[in-house]
Image (cartoon, coloured by chain):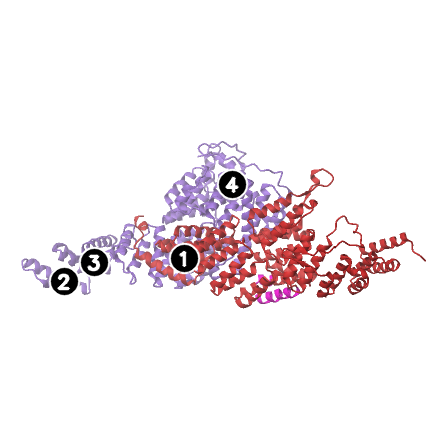
Chain colours: A purple, B red
Amino acid sequence: MTSKDNCRYELRTAIRQLSDRCLYSASKWAAEQLVGIEQDPAKFTPSNTRFQRGSSSIRRRFHSNEGSSTPIAGISYVSTPVMEEDEVVDGDFYLLAKSYFDCREYKRAAHVLREQNGKKSVFLRLYALYLAGEKRKEEEVVELEGSLGKSDAVNQELVSLERELSTLRKNGMIDPFGLYLYGLVLKQKGSENLARTALVESVNSYPWNWSAWSELQSLCTTIDILNSLNLNNHWMKDFFLASAYQELRMHNESLVKYENLQGTFSFSNYIQAQIAKAQYSLREFDQVEAIFEELLRNDPYRVEDMDMYSNVLYAKECFSALSYLAHRVFMTDKYRPESCCIIGNYYSLKGQHEKSVVYFRRALKLNKNYLSAWTLMGHEFVEMKNIPAAIDAYRRAVDINSCDYRAWYGLGQAYEMMGMPFYALHYFKKSVFLQPNDSRLWIAMAQCYESEQLRMLEDAIKCYRRAANCNDREAIALHQLAKLHSELGQSEEAAFYYKKDLERMEAEEREGPNMVEALLFLATYYKAQKKFDEAEIYCTRLLDYTGPEKETAKNLLRGMRIAQSSFPSMDVELFPP
Amino acid sequence: MRMREEEIEKLRGVVRDCLSKHLYSSAIFFADKVTAFTEDPADIYMQAQALFLGRHFRRAFHLLNASKIVLRDPRFRYLAAKCLEELKEWDQCLAMLGDANVDEHGNVLDNKDHSGMYLDKDCEDREINIVAATCFLRGKAYEALENRTQARLWYKAAIKADPLCYEALECLIESHMLTCDEESSLLSSLQFGPEDGWLPSFYACLIKKYDKENIIEARFKELERETFNSKSSDPSFIRTLKTNTDLLACKAEYYHQCGEYQKCFELTSVLLEKDPFHLKSTLVHLAAAMELGHSNELYLMACNLVKDYPQKALSWFAVGCYYYCIKKYDQSRRYFSKATTLDGTFAPAWIGYGNAYAAQEEGDQAMSAYRTGARLFPGCHLPTLYIGMEYMRTHSFKLAEQFFVQAKTICPSDPLVYNELGVVAYDMKEYNKAAWWFEKTLACIPSPLSEMWEPTVVNLAHSYRKLKMYREAIKYYEKALALSTRSLSTYAGLAYTCHLQDHFTAAITYYHKALWLKPDDQFCTEMLSLALMDECQNGMDPKVEVC
């Protein structure tokens, strides 16, 4: 791992350069990581470092005490030289433009810089134009809203931006920030390959721009694409890979990366939140809860990623904690999409689905590409039996990110409810492809194959078998497998699964009609196999139940006794009709 | 009292000065006195000029007519004819100019001696050949009499008689009297003076620009190299025509034609800042603003134009453009029609008129507008092309093809015509031919492709699909997607191609994308259901099973 001082030095320079270019979120990210770097224990007394984690105020204090640290060259990492700024060229106009930009007057900023040739000025002008276009686009979306916020609005500046940036690039006049913007423009235009190339170039020459990395990550939809990228081995690449692995559902690989990074950035809230995210995907809800509790202690006004925390609380049905969280984010900033989402979850848990939808809608008004809000809103619509609206919401979700297995599953469910198993099957397939170890998805798929319209029992069996292999909590798969096999006259397999199901029910101490069914089948089966001892055991157990099965068991027992007593003369009446 | 010669000469000087200071009444007063003293034909001519400039056309004509010399000197005749032109007495104007014949190449068959007998040359070093002026006036008279064939011949004769007679060339170009080939052969037949080396290149930039991009760009480059070296040898004093408004307007026109509307708009905006009512720039600016949907810009332009030039067709054309841009086609038609009544030779208004009908699918009216356009502007292939498109709309493929072929003879190098020919071939199920035309189209347009040509790429992909060349089809569909991701037809085509190859999952994905753009598309909905069933019948995806 590269030296901490070195990272610190690089990040400090980068923060200044990024905020000079008004790349706010990248500079915020960099600053968070800078503060997240562990202090060198040699420089500080152990008592100080012990407090570091608990109290952010102490941490901040001794950061300001720290003098200038001399950079040490990286060891195993490629050291990218810190970029030099040419201050001479960017003059007073730049300062004016930057002020306009900070006041969100993008067009005005761009106009001021129209004849400036400094690299910083050129970038700021183009970026301002881009944001002006984005702003206008957002407004247009609100003005001309189609169904569920669907609209044809486009960023009007894209065409001219693309032309100018490609010319700059051709002439070799483009800097890493320009390349980032170029990648952004290309991505929005749908030229993903070109966008990736531009972004790779950008991060290779200037690795500290997290926004560029995240754009790049959003373009890595398969592991092959990720592996094909030709990236320099800078320490920022580890952050990128960790995040990319996570999106590609390689949660364990991602966790390993993050844990490595924690060696240097031990107090990074970002890394903690990311780890929580990975654990959430691995459905380790207790761990996630613990991490978030700590995060909130350190950073009480954090809203980012808190929606995930609320999902965990929702899944665990922690009413009071969710209510506390909802009130807290509401007071912090009620008009953040995350806040609205948390409040939506809160109402949903209370069963107030209409109210919940209102808040999800608000979250989406604030950020219409907010993936989980679309999915969650879809769930709410399903609860409210408004299937068409649910389908629309899920579709928006998969349109934003086609790797969201929850939305695909939701779509499948919705179509199943509409009695369209062909459609449902397709969507379940999509979700199962993304999340192959989730028994619920396999069961849903199997049920589709079982439906009246399809009746593809063989395929249903395959699906149930997969479900049974992956930790089927509700234990539907075994029972269904047994039932299907018996329906297909494959009594041997049926007996195998009934027995397994029975064992499981015994282990979990569950009783019910499934138990009766299993016992009855096994009794009949073993009797037919002439294994009267086993058959007798099952029959005896059946006698504990009331209802027609008890009578059947009695008949079976009687039949067996007769058969055993007059063994040689076997006859047909042994089998009750 | 007798006036001395030098006193009279002084008085002549006063008249000339009054004319240059636009004090016409004074000029007329003194010229009359000079004539009274001298009776010299040259002085009569001067008096007639003064009267003409003072807009006393009838008096000027009478003065010239009364003097015996009118038929003897071409200048007298010309001025007399000019008066008749102003009085709109066209037949008499032609009669005044005398009989002459012109062949189809614009060569005047007239051996009469035209050298003036009475008049010295004006003090200017160079003058426009009076023959050229006469020919031009004949052309105008014929045009006013709606004899456009004769008008065209006489305009050609005018520019041939003197290449500096720019007005004739302007008329030929603006009213689309010549086809591309005719224009360039006319230019090559002109005989320029040795000192006008730059002029042929400039003229070459003015004519139609449907040639290959490198030829056009070479033309501009050549002209930009032309320098004017004033006496000082200091290189910083070298001025070129690079920033000349006329030239840049031609360039803007070229950008517009290439579909580079943004570039075009930026250029014309600069030009109009320099020269606010440069007519050609204004026209191109309007067209570009319309393509870009800058309705606000159009509104302001239209208001200003109508205020300052209420008599110009261009002003009302601008109003029409504004309404067209905001999709109020009824109003837009009204103003386009107003523009055509003000100036029947204003081609853009006729085409706009047709387009405004076509936008509301009123084919018959649109076609009648286009037909007028085609009749009035034989050198412009667009009306013919649009008529063909209207026939396509009504599925009269044979007729449409005829018109496209006709458009191609007028303008053999416009890729848009090739595209339409391809579309016709496609609709007549001649897919090989269609693919050939689309390939030709794409070969003709400058790369990298702009979004404007996305339909052609999709068309080519459709043709390949019909030819069962699925791999090529998919390649071109993907190319089209790189240009635009909002086309239903691309996604539907791509989905169907995948479906035909039994790639059901991919097909389903693309059907979904298509339906996302247009949720009630019947073809895609039905095909999606089929694909889903096919996928299901195929059993479980092996990929899902192993993972």
Q: Magenta residues, as a range?
A: B321-342
Identified by mark 3, the residue type is: Ser
Q: How would you rate the neighbour count of disc 3 (Cα within 10 Å): few for under 14, some for 14-19, many for 20 or more?
A: some
Q: Quadrant of residue A411?
A: bottom left
Marks 1,3: beta carbons within 8 A: no
Both marks 1 and 3 on one chain: no
Reading the image, the residue beneath label 1 is B512
Query: How far separated are the C-alphas under marks 1 and 2?
Result: 58 Å
| In this rendering, position of residue A289 left or right of residue A90 | left
In the rendered image, the vertical position of residue A49 relative to residue A297, given as above or below: above
Query: How far separated are the C-alphas under marks 4 and 1?
Result: 52 Å
**Which circle's residue, 4 or 2, is located before the other in the chain?**
4
Identified by mark 1, the residue type is: His
Q: Which mark is residue B128?
A: none
Image mark 2: chain: A
Reading the image, the residue beneath label 4 is A60
Residue B391: percent from the left, percent from the top?
50, 64
